[in-house]
Structure formats: structure tokens, C-alpha cells
Amino acid sequence: MTGSGAVRLIEKYWVVIGLSSIVAFVIVCVQATRNDNLIVTIDEMLIRMTVVVATYIFIGNSGVLSFGHIAFMCIGAYAAGWASCDPSWKQLMLTGLPEFLQDNQYPFMVSVTGAGALSALVALIFGVVVICMSGVVASIATFAFLVIVNSVYSNWESVTAATSSLIGIPTVSSPWIFFAFAVFAMVCAFLFQESRYGLMLRASRDDEVAAKSSAIDVARVRLIALVLSAFLVGLGGGLYAHFLGVLTVDVFYMSLTFITLSMLIVGGVGSLSGAVLGVLMVTLIVEALRALEGGVSIGSVLVQLPKGFQEIGLGVMMALILIFRPTGLTRSREIPFPWQMRRPNVQPRAAAAIAPVERS
Amino acid sequence: MLEVEDIHVNYGRVAALRGISLRVDESELVCILGPNGAGKSTTLAAIAGGVRPYRGAIRFNHASLTGKPPETISRLGVSLVPEGRHVFATLSVEENLRIGAYQRRDRARVESDLERALELFPRLRERLSQPAGRLSGGEQQMLVICRAMMTRPRLMMIDEPSLGLAPKIVDQVYEALLQRRHQEGVTLLINEQSSERVLEFADRIYVLRSGSVRLEGRAQDLRDGVAIMSAYFGFDDHSASSSAQATLG
Amino acid sequence: MIGFLQNLIDALSLGSLYALAALGIGLMFGVLRLINFAHGDLITVGAYALIVPAADATARMFIGAWPLPLMVLGVCAVVVAFALLSDLLLFRHLRRASAPTLMIASFAAGYIIENGILVVYGARPKAIDLWPDLGREMEIGALHVPRLQLVTIGVTVLLMAALTWFLKRTRYGVQMRAAAEDFAMARYIGVRANFVIGLAFSISGILAAVASLLYISQTGGLSFTLGVPLMLFGLIATVIGGMGSLLGAVVGGLAVGFVSSMLQAYLPEGLRSFRDAFVFAIVILILLLRPSGLIPTKALVPRI
């Protein structure tokens, strides 16, 4: 490959390359601190990044606000748990599971892939219902979906251990493994948004009627986005299962929904960069608040916030972004290629449906 | 009475008004003409407080209106009847009429005003307790004009009163408006697309096109309609015609 | 037969509670086009207002110890204050925002309130005993009905009547209805936007406060997420009944209460715990078939 050909290739995929580099840099820095707590935080951040990027694939391109992605994370996590935890425990506690799950213990990649697959399947079924609905109605349906999944998983004792925990999932702790999955999600997101499906979907986001009049099958492209999104969210759920080692259903409900949505909105709901940078930003701020909760000496003064301020801080941050910068920190644009070549920067992708158009 | 100075209004990134200036003196009947998209509705909306100009000023009897909310401007005596007959469909006819008067303190006069409105349009009296959504187009137009009159405005602005109405109904509407103007001395600022009626009873006329004022003058001077047509359709726009010639030639 | 009637009163009582929640949410949507996810947290605030703000394991009554009229007023005042504050600090600055932005904003407001309660009162659930007398049963013929259920139904009917009177017979009610129908036009005709909105939040707050008192009297347990189930059911009740229609909110609430109670009573043993999942699945079905709800006024589906 010639020099300029290589540069052109980098320029084409710059968004993914640039973002992954930033994230890799952060990981390296954190690893250098040798602080175990921080490394755990980074692991969780990378898993959330996978989930948020996956959520962006649907919300950012379709303009339909979804509250249901954490339901897919739940489905994926439990699927991975079923696949990979100890068979003797499963045979005792999870008697409702089919035999091929009860009797076997599958390796990491299989369980995670299975997690994504199951989520995608459920998304296909649920999606057929939701894609016909417009805007706010669809959002409410996704909200109902979250409640349904939570209710089912909280009560189906023979399959999920209901309100007790599902234990014994083999854990994985290298951040680079989670990083690989996050990059995979980014690549999928990028390829989707650059594909004609992504284009068609964004057209429907900006003007549904016009899109339909241009022979775009809005329902079909939405379904594709939803299934792809759910697959990746399910992968994230599977990763989460292998990160925690123990699963309970109440983790996958309103709180996590709010946190992941915040990450997407703070970064910018209409761009991949927004999803990734939003995760970084929110994690940074929440960690800072957590440190303050633990007590930090600034000069000779001990500053300590009461417990619970982390969450309040996150809520306030969301409120401020919604009021002052609804398109997010990135203004729903992608990160620019640092070396301008013959032509100027890429078009901004304004997510008109969720955030109002920037006033001139 | 009303002074609009060089207002500019954008909808997002689209320029709707590019420097509109006009004035209306007391007891005048001023009409704004112009094709669709000229900025007529936006001009009235800006005066009434529905949209905010990012440049320019609006004054009513020397009090500044720019940036004030619509409800405050209504209380200052400026009433807008927007186009499209926005009746409150689920409220009764009577509720629609009375809601205009809630901001007033003179209870007794409110009742007599209501009476007078109903005398002017007897059909409304028949339907007082019905939901306003059930009225015909013409009745609704009468209703919204009466509703605005119930605020006892000093300046009443009406956006395309004849839109979508049969000519006979439009006659009635204008008759009522003129009667009211004659009796109360209300100043009127009316948007219209068609110039015929307008030339009959307006004092002065503005013609808008593409967000700016293309012509201003007294109705009696413009009676032959030539100047109006030219401003309306853009015959006077030399840059457009020369570029058209270049393309065709 | 007796069993069925008993279940029916159960259903009515539950439905009344949901109708109250639905009214609060429906009002917000009608006037502001806001789906207020924080409504449940206002209910939580009302319940917590009864006790002394402290993280103790055993709750000590604060407003809860006041005589009845003062207690009700006190709880209402606290909840209305929170509701108005949420408008002042957050929603007022989002008047022109899109529907999804408003939804997330209310989600954020709820999150902040929930965690605020957590900070002040601690995470441990507490038990309180409000109006223990109402737990006693009354005999109506062959039926044994807990008084609380009758009170719930009665209070809801009363509040609905009061709200209807307010909307139809007072100036402020007429202005609110006008604003709910066409906000811009209402302002042109002199209706004060912020006042009407403040009124809507206040009424919504009162409805939340009453719902919280009835609910806490029933369950006796304080937790920082206590209002969430009511919000969920109130929301789907509004959606089913038709957003923007207050009658729809009430009908929706009663319908959801009815379906929920009946499912609880008549579902086979194994499926009973999935009752909520069934209810929400039915909601999705209704949304699919009739997106505007059972009593459509303003469609959520934009018309071309």
C-alpha cells in the first residue's frame, strides 16, 4: 500500500482509530497507576462503553429514544451466566434451564457470543412490534419492555434464581479483553452508520414522512438497527457477567438505564464520538465525585461529600447538559481528522429528533 | 402608535425576516400584502411576542415590546388573531369568548362587550354552550375575532382573515371588523394575500416579499395595482430579472 | 359471588390509586407535553415527609404526628414545593425542548430526588404505621372490606369531582384547558404561561401527595423507590386511556387496576408472580393497536 493510500485509509476510518487510541491511552495511564480500584473501574467503563456504543447505534441513527437497552444487557448477562457457570450448581438451582445449558460449561467466547445471539433474537421478536410505532409511543413501549424483562427475570426462579444471585461465573479481568470488545462495537457502529442502512435510518430520523416517500422502508431499517444494537448490548451483558462473577436482576433496571443514557446524552446522542467520549467523561466525573465522597484533602481542608452525592452529581450534570448543550459535548459531531487534506471536515450529524437544532 | 424598526427573525438557520420596518398610526387600517413565505405571519408573530427578533426593535405607544412574552403584550393592548382560526375546540363558544376578557378588570363592561359581540354575530349566540370545534369555518373565524375583541385591544392584528372562507362570509367578517373599527376606534393591522378587498378600505399598504418590505404607500396612491403587482411578484427585482435573462439569453 | 365482589372492590381500590397517579401524570402531559417520570418520586417525597429527616433505622413521625387536616396540608405543601422547584430549576428552561429531551429531563429529576432522599434518610427501608384504624374491616352485607379501600375509592372520587369542577367552573381551570389545547394561542389571548404551568405542577403535586398518603397507609413501608411502581402504573394508565385526556387517565387507571387485580386473583399459581409482566405486555399490545389510547384526544402519533 502506498503512503498516501495508507493515509487515506486512516482518514476514512479515523473516527474509530482516533477514538480507540484515546481509550487505549486512558487504559495505559490507569494501568500505570497500579491502583486496583481504578483498574476495576476501567474494566466496568469499557463494558459500559460497549453497551453505550451499541445503544447509540439504535438511538443515534433512528432518533427513537429507547429505555429498553438495559433489558437486553440483562438477557445477555444471564445467558452468559447460564452458559458458563458451574453445572452442578445449575443442576441444583436452575432446574428450569434446558439440558444443554444445565449440563455443560462453555468457554468465554461461546458464552459471550451466545449472550449476544439471545439478545438479538429477543430484539427481533420485540422489534417487530416496536418498529411500527412512532417516536414517543415507541419510547414508552421500550420502557414497558424494560419492566417486563425485569419482572420476568425477577420471578422466574427456576431459570434465573429470581431474587437470589446467580453465582460462580468464571471471571475475566484484563481490561484489554474488554477493550477489544469495545473496539469491535465501535467498528460495527461505524460501519453501520456509513452503510446505506445507516443513511436511510438517519434520513427517517430527520424527517420520517419524507423518508417514507423516498421509498425507504423505515420499519425494516429500524429493525436492523435494533437487532444489531441488541446483539452488541447483549455482548456487553455477557462481558458484565464475566466481570462480576455474580448476577442479580435488580442491577439491570432504572439506575443503570439512567447512567448509560446519561453517558450517551452527555457525549452527544447523534455521534459515535459522542457515545465514546460521553462514557469517558461521565466515568471521570463520577469517579471524581466518588473520591470526594471518600474524603479528599485540598490544602489543609478535608472535603468530604455525603454518600449519594455521586448520583446527584450525575443527575445534575444531565440536567445542565439538557438545558445548555442538548446536542452533547461533541455537538453530535464526530471527532475531526487532525490533518486536513484536500477537502474540509466531515458533515456534522445533528440528531434533530432528540436534541433541538442548535440556534444560530 | 406601533413602530417596527428593522427586525430580523430566523427560524433555526433560515432567515424569515431580513430587516422589516413599518409603522401603524392610531385609528389606521394598515394592510400587509405578499405571497406565501414572504414573512407576513412572522411579522405579526414578532409584534405579538410569539417569535423573538434577534435584531431590531418594536415599540407600541413608546413602550418596548421586543422580547416581551405574548401574554404581556396582550395586556398592553395588542391582540393577534393568528391564521388558521385557532379556536379552543374543546372549550365552549362562551368560554372562548370570555377567556379573552380574563385579563380585564372592568366586569360590567365585559358583559356588555359580550352582548355586543353576540349582536354582531347572532349565530354565535345560538351556539354559546357548544364546543367551539363544532362550528363551521366561517363561524370559527367570527369567533376568534370576537375573542380577540374581548381583550379590548387598542391594536388588533389579524393574519389572513379571508383564508379558506367563502366570499360571502369574508364580506361579513370584514363588515364586522370595519363596524368595530368605526365604533371603537380600534387600530387594525391585517395580513392578506389578495389585494382587491384591501385596496377598498385600507389606509396604507405594505408589500412584503422574501422577508423584506418591497413597497409602502397609501392605498389611494396604489389603486391601479401596478406597483403592488410588481412588488408582489418581483418584477421590480433587477438582480433576479437580469440573472434570469442571463440564463435564458 | 362474594369472592368476586370482594375482588371487584379490591380492583376499584387499586384502580383508584392508579387513577390518582395517572391524573397527575396526565395533567402534566396535557398542559406541558411532559411525561413526568419524576411523578413517582414526588409520591416518595410525600411519604418521607411524614417522618423526621434522619437516617435512623426506626422512623420517628414528624408531620405524620400532626392532626389530620394539618398533616394532609403539610404533606401537600412539601410535595407541591418539590414539584414547583422541579419546574423552576429544570423544566422552565426546557420549554421549547423536544419530547424525548423532556422525558430524559424528568428521568434525571426523578434520579436526583431519589438519591436526595437516599442522602437524607439513608438506604434502609423503614416501617411506619399511618392510620392503623383504617386497616380494620367494615361489614357491608356479607362482604368484609378494609376501610382503607373504601376511603381510597371515596377520596379519589372526591378529588376527581373537585378537579372537574375546577377545570370547568373556574377561570383558572378554563385557562388551563385552553393552554392544554393550544398553548401558543392561549398566550396570545393573555393566559399567563408560567402561572398556568405552576398551577398544573401544584395540582399534580397535590394528587401525588394524596396518593402517597393512601399508599403508605396501605403498605406501611418506606423505601426510596416506593413511588416507582405507582409511577409505572400511572404512566401506562395514562397511555392506555389516552394521553392528554383526564377522563382517559381515570379510565386507564381503573382499567389497569382492574386487570391487575383480576390477574392477581385468577391467574394460576405459577404465573401469578408474573402479573406485572402480563400487564405491561397488554400495554404494548394496546399501544400497537391504538396508539392514541382508548379515549383519544390528542394523538401521540403526529398527523401529516
Image: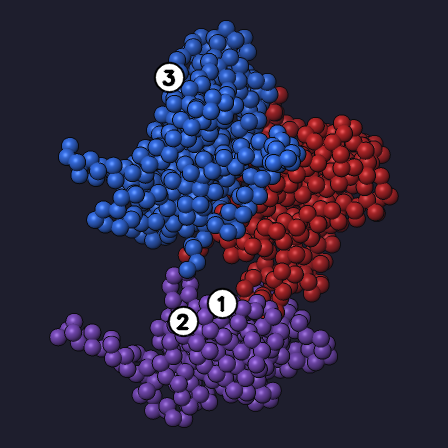
Chain colours: A blue, B purple, C red
Residue under numbered circle 1: B52
Q: Quadrant of the C terminus of chain A?
A: bottom left
Residue closer to the observer: A360 or A93: A360
Classify mark 3: helix, strand or loop: helix
3 and 1 marks on the same chain:
no
Q: B201 or B10: which is nearer to us?
A: B10
Farthest residue, direction front = A300
Q: Which residue is mark 2?
A: B17
- Mark 3 vs mark 2: in front: 2
- Structural crowding at the residue carrying mark 3, measured as other residues with C-alpha within 10 Å and reported as few (<14), some (14–19) or many (≥20): some
Q: What kind of residue is marked 1?
A: Arg
Other residues around mark 1 within 10 Å, as few (<14) / some (14–19) / many (≥20): many
Q: Amino acid at mark 3?
A: Val
User: Which label sits on residue B204?
Assistant: none
- Which residue is outermost to the right? C67
Q: Amino acid at mark 2?
A: Leu
- The residue at the point 76 percent across, 34 percent down is C54
The chain under label 1 reads B
**B237 in relation to A4, above or below:** below
Residue for point 51% across, 67% down: B50
Query: In the rendered image, which quarter is residue B43 located in?
Result: bottom left
Q: Subunit of mark 2?
A: B
> Is C65 situated left or right of A162 in this image?
right
